[in-house]
Image: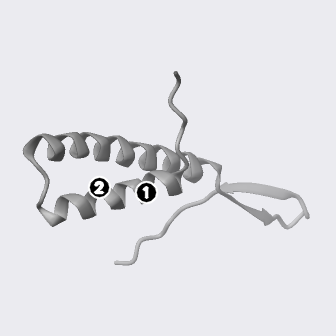
C-alpha cells in the first residue's frame, strides 16, 4: 500500500505531537528512537513543502512600458 503524501500542515502538526511526546520524557528508548525517526521524516516533508512554495512565489511588477515582469520573491532578513 502506498503512503499518502502529507500536507505541510499535517506534517507540522504531527511533528509538534512528536516533540510534545518526547518532551514529556515518559517514553521508552525504543519509542523515543521510533518517534525521532518519524520526526526527521516530518521535518523533511515540511522542508520540501516550504522549498516548493518558495519556488512558486513571485512578485509581479509593472514596467514603465506597462508590461508585466516576473521577479523572484526574496525574503529580506533584518540585520
Viewport quadrant of the C terminus: bottom left
Residue of label 1? 12
User: Would residue 10 appear left or right of 41 to someone viewing this image?
Assistant: right
Residue of label 2? 18
Q: Nearer the viewer, mark 1 or mark 2?
A: 2
Return the x and y of residue 16 as percentages of the image width and height. 35, 61
Circle 1 packing at 10 Å, graded few (<14), some (14-19), many (20+), is: some
**74 and 24: which is toward the camera:** 24
Circle 2 packing at 10 Å, graded few (<14), some (14-19), many (20+), is: some
Q: Which residue is pictured at 50% across the width and 53% down the height? A: 10
The image shows residue 12, relative to residue 45, as above or below, that is: below
User: Would residue 7 appear left or right of 16 to someone viewing this image?
Assistant: right
The image shows residue 66, relative to residue 28, as above or below, that is: below
Q: Earlier in the sequence, mark 1 or mark 2?
A: 1
Tag on residue 73? none
Q: Which residue is pictured at 91% across the width and 64% down the height? A: 66
User: Would residue 70 appear left or right of 28 to someone viewing this image?
Assistant: right
Q: Which residue is pictured at 47% across the width and 43% down the height? A: 48
The image shows residue 59, relative to residue 78, as above or below, that is: above
In which quadrant of the rendered view does residue 19 lie?
A: bottom left
User: Would residue 35 appear left or right of 48 to someone viewing this image?
Assistant: left
Return the x and y of residue 41 as percentages of the image width and height. 35, 40
Mark 1 to mark 2: distance in Å?
A: 10 Å
Q: Which residue is pictured at 44% across the width and 44% down the height? A: 45
Please report contact status of discs 1 and 2: CB closer than 8 Å, yes or no: no
Amino acid at each position: 500500500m502506498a503512503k499518502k503524501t502529507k500536507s505541510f500542515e499535517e506534517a507540522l502538526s504531527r511533528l509538534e505531537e512528536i516533540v510534545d511526546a518526547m518532551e514529556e520524557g515518559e517514553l521508552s528508548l525504543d519509542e523515543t528512537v521510533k518517534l525521532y525517526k518519524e520526526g526527521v521524516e516530518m521535518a523533511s516533508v515540511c522542508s520540501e513543502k516550504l522549498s516548493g512554495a518558495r519556488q512558486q512565489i513571485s512578485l509581479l511588477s509593472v514596467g514603465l512600458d506597462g508590461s508585466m515582469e516576473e521577479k523572484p520573491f526574496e525574503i529580506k532578513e533584518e540585520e
